[in-house]
Amino acid sequence: MKPKSKTGELDPDSLVGFATITEYTVLKVLGDATKEKYGAPYDLISSSLGTINVKYSIIHVDRNKRYWFFSKPRSSKIPDYYICLGFDEFQTEIIRVWLIPGNSKEIAKDGISISENKDERLKRYFVNPKIYNKTFQKMDIKKLPDFCNTTKPKVSESRYERKQWELEANIFNFMDWNEKLIQN
């Protein structure tokens, strides 16, 4: 049986599916790269940057701290660069991008954590996210070979709608709970 990526049926809402979408986003922005096959040690190979691994993370909120965490397997090969895409909490918009050399001391064994406001150590690796976000927003996943036969909607739309529904459900539950509390 062929993997779903080979038959064009990869689920855009899965971790592998969304990672593939981020790889295509970076591929299109760079313009001089080729995408490696699934399971290769690197995601992309660029004529100007060399080997690249694309990482993505939604923003995490822990008390008053907002941060992204880009994980990497300890056993993975070190590329020339990591391109890290920082998404909003709904995973619908790329709000930060970093181009980090693979040999940077900022990268821990299991990945890299980047604070939203207080991380001056990585400021030099920051890249303007506008072109990445614009490319991501306009991408038609049905035209990508990994998704050409999928019946799912665009990933960012479905995730956003699900998050909106969860938020509305939480508000409704709170209002219902509050009303019961007042009645007692």
Image (spheres, rainbow, N blue to C red):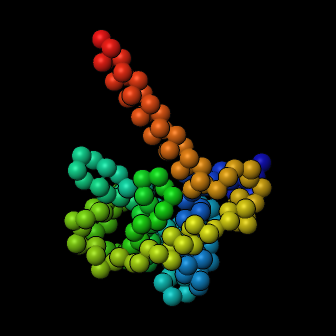
3 lies above or below 93: above
Q: Is residue 55 left or right of residue 63?
A: right
Residue 184 occupies which quadrant of the picture?
top left
| Residue placed furthest toward the bottom | 48
- Residue at x 49%, y 44% (from the top left corner): 163
Left or right: 98 in relation to 169: left
- How many badges with numbers are in the image? 0
* Residue in the picture at 39% in, 59% down: 70
What residue is shown at x 39% (from left), y 73% (from top)?
A: 98
Where residue 85 sits, quadrant-wise, is: bottom left
Q: Which residue is drawn at 59% across and 63% down?
A: 21
Residue 85 shows in the view: yes
Locate residue 5, reporting x and y percent.
70, 57
Q: In this picture, is 123 found above or below 5?
A: below
The location of residue 51, given as percent across then percent down, is 50, 77
Q: Can residue 4 be seen in this view?
A: no
Picture coordinates of residue 155, whole percent (x, y): 60, 54
